[in-house]
Image (cartoon, rainbow, N blue to C red):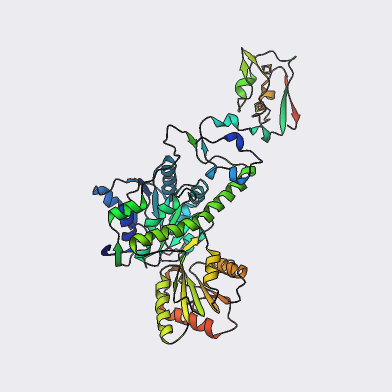
Amino acid sequence: MGIRERLSGNEAVAYAIKQINPDVMPAFPITPSTEIPQYVAGYIANGEIDTEFIPVESEHSSMSATLGASAAGARALTATSSCGMALMWEELYVAASNRLPVVLALVNRALSGPININCDHSDSMGARDSGWIQIYAENNQEAYDNFLQAYRIAEHKDVRLPVMICQDGFITSHAVENIELIEDDKVKAFVGEYNPENYLLNAEQPMAVGPYATSPYYMETKKGQREAMINAKDVILEVGREFGAMSGRSYGFYEGYQLEDADYVMVIIGSAAGTAKDAVDILRDAGKKVGILKVRVFRPFPAKELALALQNAKAIAIMDRAESFSGEGGPLGTELTTALFHAKSTAKVVNYFYGLGGRDFRVENAEAVFEEIASKDNIEPYQYIGLRQ
Amino acid sequence: MATDISKIHEKSPWQDITPGNQIYGAGTSKDFMTGEWRTQTPVLDAEKCTQCLLCTPVCPDSCIPVKDMKREDFDLEHCKGCGICAKACPFGAISMREGQ
Ligand code: SF4
Ligand code: SF4
């Protein structure tokens, strides 16, 4: 039995960092992720951990220093949100292509503009093609649990890719909820020590990191990255199972809530899944066969697994908390629709944009979505929820 | 384990490219045959060469080896065909021809 506490999402992730005691954390503050480095700096100042904290002048530098530390052989991480991540853009790709197993504690916040500090997924969704593994949390417990699994996935020899642990800005990061923490010794045993085979500070074996690759090499390098991402699927499942054996909370690519026999399914990422579950409870009481598929892992994209989980659905509402400005679907909508097409699904699919820039997503909004996909035949395939018109 | 750089070339399948293009080992550039990038090739006219050795230090790729105070022929496994040596030679002993 773990330790019962009540923590915000930021506190929970900072606590996970304390328990892991990584080697290096460069960071630059940005709302709503600022508290994470702030709490970690407190742990260091109090002598509770010996992580090397590097205060840097920008996020471009925080990610650069994180990568440098990782290449040198350290277990490294940073935290950021929104425009902070945008300033790391170049380094995000460098992290993944150089196969550096760093972790980013991302607190999702809308990207400017208009400037806005509230939650949506435009930051991480914008980085979906950067080569990072992306794992999303519904609440503080999942943010904590996901963080404890991150290095096991990132550092696995068949993977060696950076991992982004995402939680919803303010909704999860600042709301204090009950949480079950795991004992320090169990965490240490689960996460383990980082012993890279090769690292820059190894005088016995010099190495080169990040060499120039001309066009005869670039494409083959990218294919290697793709394979590592595909390999990550088994590792994520294995680590999720092992975590379950230790904590009683197992994790996979997604969570189904009343999904098994559901005719009408909402596919959603992050904290709004909790709201949608309330709507499912209400509608189930009224005899409606509705359910939720909450996507936990967006990169690698578990296309086949999601399509299989949705094979009995008559209608599917795919919820995007980020625009992609194709004039068509959002990131999740587009990718999941592709997956359903390949699986020869005949389900009705509607892609909703919701919660942009922190717009409330309420239980009644979720209920209305279920009502709409269950009752109407010709629905606009792309819609906004709560848009004034 | 050190990377065998001689196994990484323009015909290598993706499986042979190291993760992140990382290279384990030092001084491996001499084993990496970058001369294949060349589109022009320097040619030495030994008759005209006075062994003044002005060409050797200007080569950005160290492709004009010197032995016993005398320059030897070009190291075409690494020469990029930039033509700097031809420009630097005061005796017109180096000409550039098209192709590898
Ligand atoms: S052509 Fe350029 S690379 Fe080749 S030998 Fe001359 S100076 Fe060196
Ligand atoms: S500069 Fe010309 S003459 Fe002098 S050593 Fe080189 S090739 Fe010979």
Q: Residue extending furthest left?
A: A46
Q: Quadrant of ligand 2?
A: top right
Relative to A60, does residue A321 appear above or below in the rendering?
below
Kindly indicate the quadrant of the structure image that contains residue A163. bottom left
Kindly indicate the quadrant of the structure image that contains residue B50. top right
Q: Residue extending furthest front?
A: A245
Horizontal arrangement in the rendering, residue A114 relative to residue A245 (left or right): right
Please provide percent x and percent y for residue A155. 44, 49
Horizontal arrangement in the rendering, residue A121 relative to residue A174 (left or right): right
Q: Which quarter of the rendered picture does the N terminus of chain A lie within?
A: bottom left
Q: Is residue A265 visible?
A: yes
Of A355 and A284, which appears nearest the observer?
A284
Residue plotted at (45% across, 78% down): A366
Residue plotted at (58% across, 46% down): A221
Please provide percent x and percent y for residue B9. 63, 38
Relative to A94, does residue A377 appear above or below in the rendering?
below
Residue plotted at (24% across, 47% down): A47
Relative to A387, does residue A61 appear above or below in the rendering?
above
Horizontal arrangement in the rendering, residue A307 relative to residue B37 (left or right): left
Q: Residue extending furthest bottom?
A: A286
Please provide percent x and percent y for residue B31. 59, 30
Please provide percent x and percent y for residue B2. 51, 35
Q: How many marks?
A: 0
Relative to A93, does residue A267 appear above or below in the rendering?
below
Of A375 and A330, which appears nearest the observer?
A375
Q: Is residue A324 visible?
A: no
Of B37 and A118, which appears nearest the observer?
B37
Residue plotted at (39% across, 47% down): A76
